[in-house]
Image: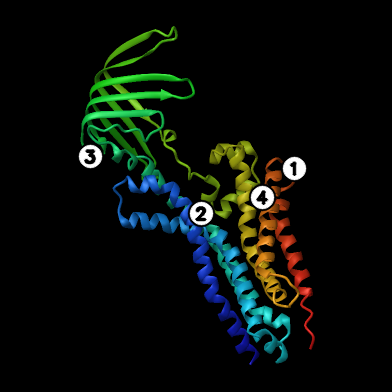
Amino acid sequence: MKLLLQRYLAAQLITPLVVSTFFFIGFLLTLDLFKLTNLLVTREISLWFVAGLVANLALSFVPLALPIAVFFSTIYCVNRLSSDSEYIAMRAAGLTKEKILLPFLLVAALLSTSVYHLNQNFIPHSNKEFKRKVNYLTSSGLLAGIKAGQFFNLIPGLTLFATRSTKYGRSLEEVFLQIKDKKTNDDRVIFAARGELIFERDPNSLIEKLTLILFNGNIIGQNDKNEIEKILFTKYIFPISQSQFQDRFSVKETMLSSVELKEVLSMTFKEAEKIYKFNKKEFFNAKYEYWNRKNGALIIFVFCFLGFSLGITGTRGKGKNSGVIGISCLILYYGLFFSLVSMANKDQIPVTLAVFFPASVMGMLGIWFYKKLDWQS
C-alpha cells in the first residue's frame, strides 16, 4: 500500500514537471532566437537545418531550465495534494513526512544524474554543433545576401555594390566597395571592373576563410597628409576575416567536455592560452563552467527538497503564500549566486565557494521549512 502511494506521488509530479520544463526551455529559446532571426530569415537554409539549430540550442538550456521547473512543479504538486486533503489522508494512514518526501527526492535524484551525464559530453558536443551551424550562417550563408544592383552592408565596416552578380556573389561585375575602419577611422573606396569571391572551408569547424579578389580597378583614400590619393591596380586581394562577422554565440568553455575542463583547472593561464587560446576571462569561465556543471545537478535535488517544504507550509493556514516565498527564494539564490561569481572573477573568493555556497543556503532554508511541518497526530 505504501509503495503504491509513493508511486502515485511520483506520477503526480511528472506531468507538471514536463510542462514547466518545456515552458522554461521555450522561454529561454525565444530570447536567443531573437538574436538569430536576422540570420535565419535572410538565408536560403533548409527546415532540417533550422530544426537542428533549435534542437542544439534547446539541449544547452536543459541544465538552466530543469532546476526551476523541478522547484515550481514540486510546489504545485504538493500544494494540490494539501488543498485536496490528500496529504492529510496519507498522514492519517500512517505515512510519515519522510516517506511522502521520498518519491519526490527519487525523481530529483534521477533528474540530477541525467543532467550530470548530459553535462559531461552531450551538451558540450551539442554546443559545438550549434557553433558550427552559426559559423555557417555568419560566413557563406551571410553572403547569400549579395544581390545585383543592391547595396550589401551586413558585414560591419564594409559596403558592397555590384551591377551584376552570380549566386552568393561568387562572380561580380562593376564592383563598388567602401571600407571603413572604426579604430583608425580609415575610409577607402574601391572601384573594380570585376571581382571573385573565393571560399575555403574547414570541414570540421565549418569556419570559412573568405577572400574577395578584385581586377582592373582603383583605390581612393587619404594619405597621412590628408591628401586624396588614387592607386590603380590590375589585381587586388581583400581578405574577409571571420572576426568581421558579428558572432555573439562563441563561448569556448561550454564546448569543452568535463574531462577537458578538469585539465584546465590544473593549468596556468599561459598554458591554457597556448592550448585553448583562452584569454583571462575565458580562463576564469572555464573553471567556473567545470564547477557549475556539478552544481547544476546538485541544485535540482536541493530545489526539490525546498519546493516540497514550501508546498506544505503554504497551505497550513499561517498566512504564507508558497508561490511568493518560492519566487523570493529564487531571487535570493540567483542574486547571491551571480554576486559571488562576480567576486570570484575578481579573485576575491574561490570559485567553488561562489558556486556551491548559494546552494548550501537554499539547502538550509529547505531544512528550516521542513522542520516547521509540525503536523499533529
Q: Which mark is residue 261?
A: none
Task: Look at mark 3 in the image and give the residue it sits on.
Answer: 167
Q: Measured from the top left, where is residue 55 in percent x and y?
A: 43, 59
Is residue 318 shown above or below 360? Answer: below
Q: Which mark's residue is nearer the viewer, 2 or 1?
A: 1
Q: Which mark is residue 124?
A: 2
Mark 1: amino acid: Gln
Mark 4: amino acid: Phe
Cβ atoms under marks 2 and 1 closer than 8 Å: no
Mark 2: amino acid: Pro
Q: Earlier in the sequence, mark 2 or mark 4?
A: 2
Please tell me how crowded label 1 is: few (under 14), some (14-19), or many (20+) other residues with Cα within 10 Å. Answer: few
Helix, strand or loop at label 2? It is helix
Helix, strand or loop at label 1? It is loop
Q: Measured from the top left, where is residue 276 in percent x and y?
A: 54, 41
Q: Which mark is residue 338?
A: 4
Is residue 124 shown above or below 202? Answer: below
Q: Is residue 132 visible?
A: no
Q: Which mark's residue is nearer the viewer, 4 or 1?
A: 4
From the viewer's perspective, tell me whether residue 176 is left or right of residue 242.
Answer: left
The quadrant of the image that shows the N terminus is bottom right
Q: Earlier in the sequence, mark 2 or mark 1?
A: 2
Cβ atoms under marks 4 and 1 closer than 8 Å: no
Marks 4 and 1 sit apart, C-alpha to C-alpha, by: 14 Å
